[in-house]
């Protein structure tokens, strides 16, 4: 096991993508054999220099540190292709090669609902998050969210309140906690569910990780519920990713005078299901639980792409050229914020329209 | 003019439908000539005995009373086919033969928006009704509603507040006011718009008139906005009729804990446009103002019928047979309330699926 884990860690540290893994497996048979290859053979298989070097000459200290972390009952890595890899997550564009898990791997195989929303919700929004999480956790759903303050925290707590299961996807290494105020909550989640990340140990919570991480929240789940969200918030990114992954999107309506209802209303206008009670979600998801969990091979993400119709994306495509450009340059040319840009770039990357290069530069794909 | 009005009043008192009028006109040329026919000639034209008698031997006292009422500058009758008849109203199924108007007939030719909702709204709902009516009246829309307490009253008042135009459709004769508390409001509307009804003078505000009247509110307008409404409320009937008439339906979302948001949420789920601000409505309707008002001959009501897909309607159709049945019998057999039944029966009648007979009995058509 240590041998196989070591191989997977080497590949993950090299930022190998699943598509590249599949090429290497067809050539070299198994992961143990891949990591035994010389740099030249990896180059010949079509890998970039950077990745070939990282695999052929791994940083043993990093690998040892990760293996040492793994030497704990509740610490796991799950690799793409393993039975333990969550089936719904295996279907999404940009599925991660390796997941670091602190907690119970089984939780990732429960039917799951994502509950996400504002970091600064109203009291009513917080209460709704707790109540919906409680109800659905009692019905056997695992509640997935992002461990952020506000709606996320309330959702995790709601599930824990009723002895349910909950999963938090992190935007940093599994050996860190962010925000610090959620240390106790993170501990409780690891004991009643799982903390999950695709980032290697020690990775700091960089801003661009959070929209990237959002695809895993929606990707693990049958559906995503947005409780309160301003326009242009990260929760809308999660909802958009859910729709693109072919998953259900649910949104709570609210008063027209509540700015945090705006994001939800925008989603409803775009086709999200308007939800008034947790039972509405149960009714929608119950028939999918058996179906989607079993027929994972047949499912394909929705063809319809909201990205196509969005003028901000058109503008971004116009500014992006085949000469690499940094996000700061994009910011000054587009009038969009860094937050907006990093979300949009991620989505375009998942669509195969954009490639991210070293040095935080982006370019349109070939 | 008195002569022509007299003829129209006779036909209206006989409950002549527009379709029947058209048959008679093709046979007898004009309305003056129709009312000069003998009962036998009217029978021969396919009219029912009741209607033939009512036309050939009208109640002169009733007609004189109506003509006397007409002898006032602001009192009018508008007959189907006349230029003064509102163009959008002329398109709807069940368009009335004659409208009684107290006020300015011109108002009925302005681009109009219906604002309807609960008789017992929240304070927030009332405020929204006033604000939306003010904004849209300022933009040149006439605000149509039903003079009921609550949202209706607030909508009329909002339009009047800003010196705008407003139209109230009544469920009783034009010589009455209901509810009595709205006497002053009705007077103000007659001076800054119009009170309109299809019911003859002296008609009492029977319960079944109100859903029937609702088709005129939606029928005059480019769109209908529902501000707050419980499930199964009369406002939802108006919205459903608007959709069936091919008009826009708008609904305000609200907190999931507000029972009066439920009706609006139901509409949004069925395809009504979710509205957060009055500007949303303006954006939707502005392009229609020129288009729909001009191309009235080409327009046809929407083909899509929500009635088809509703299980309550299926149940009602099953209970209705070709043997006439009263609404009380329907109530005991269906588990639906009289209010629900009278709305549903009206809609089925407008669809040509149901006929109403004397004695308050109903039967499936043909």
Image (tube, coloured by chain):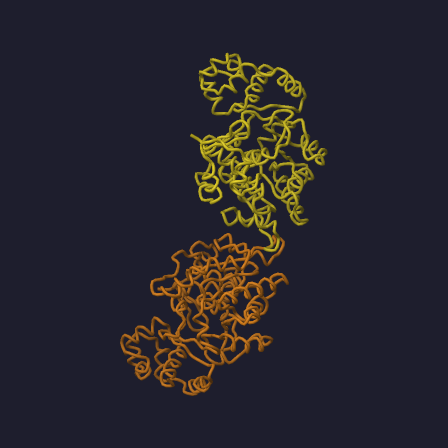
Chain colours: A yellow, B orange
Q: In the picture shown, does residue B42 fall above or below B245?
A: below
The N terminus of chain A: image quadrant: top right
User: Residue B357: x percent and y percent?
Assistant: 41, 71
At horizontal 51% and vertical 68% (from top left) the residue drawn is B145
A155 vs B261: above or below: above
Above/below status of A164 relative to B104: above
Which is nearer the eye, A131 or B105?
Answer: B105
- The number of discs equals 0
Image location of residue B259, percent across then percent down: 61, 57
Would residue B329 be seen by someone viewing this image from the given angle? no
> Can I make out residue A3 in this image?
yes
**If the image is split into quadrants, where does the C terminus of chain A sit?**
top left
Who is closer to the viewer here, A255 or B324? A255
| Residue B165 image offset from top left, x and y in percent | 50, 71
The quarter holding residue A100 reads top right
Q: Is residue B131 left or right of residue A313?
A: right
In the image, what residue occupies the spot 57% across and 31% down?
A109
Image x and y of residue B351, in percent: 40, 63
Indicate the quadrant where residue B364 lies.
bottom left
């Amino acid at each position: 096991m240590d041998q196989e884990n070591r191989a997977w860690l080497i590949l993950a540290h090299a930022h190998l993508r699943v598509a590249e893994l599949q090429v290497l497996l067809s050539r070299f048979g198994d992961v143990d054999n891949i990591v035994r290859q010389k740099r030249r053979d990896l180059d010949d298989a079509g890998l970039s220099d950077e990745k070939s070097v990282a695999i052929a000459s791994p940083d043993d200290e990093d690998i040892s540190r990760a293996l040492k972390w793994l030497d704990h009952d509740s610490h796991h890595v799950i690799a793409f292709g393993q039975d333990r890899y969550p089936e719904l997550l295996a279907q999404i564009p940009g599925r991660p090669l390796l997941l670091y898990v602190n907690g119970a791997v089984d939780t990732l195989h429960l039917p799951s609902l994502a509950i996400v929303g504002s970091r600064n919700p109203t009291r009513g929004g917080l209460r709704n998050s707790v109540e919906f999480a409680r109800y659905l956790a009692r019905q056997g759903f695992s509640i997935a969210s992002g461990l952020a303050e506000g709606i996320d925290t309330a959702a995790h707590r709601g599930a824990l309140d009723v002895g349910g299961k909950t999963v938090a996807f992190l935007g940093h290494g599994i050996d860190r906690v962010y925000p610090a105020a959620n240390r106790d909550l993170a501990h409780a989640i690891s004991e009643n569910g799982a903390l999950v990340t695709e980032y290697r140990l020690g990775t700091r919570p960089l801003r661009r990780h959070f929209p990237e991480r959002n695809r895993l929240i929606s990707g693990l789940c049958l559906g995503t519920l947005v409780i309160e969200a301003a326009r242009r918030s990260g929760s809308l990114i999660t909802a958009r990713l859910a729709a693109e992954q072919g998953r259900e999107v649910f949104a709570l309506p609210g008063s027209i005078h509540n700015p945090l209802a705006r994001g939800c209303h925008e989603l409803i206008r775009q086709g999200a299901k308007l939800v008034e009670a947790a039972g509405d979600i149960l009714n929608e998801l119950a028939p999918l639980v058996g179906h989607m969990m079993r027929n994972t091979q047949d499912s394909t993400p929705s063809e319809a792409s909201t990205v196509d119709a969005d003028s901000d994306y058109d503008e971004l495509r116009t500014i992006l050229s085949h000469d690499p450009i940094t996000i700061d340059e994009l910011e000054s040319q587009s009038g969009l914020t860094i937050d907006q840009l990093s979300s949009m770039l991620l989505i375009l990357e998942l669509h195969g329209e954009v490639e991210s290069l070293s040095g935080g530069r982006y370019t349109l794909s070939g």
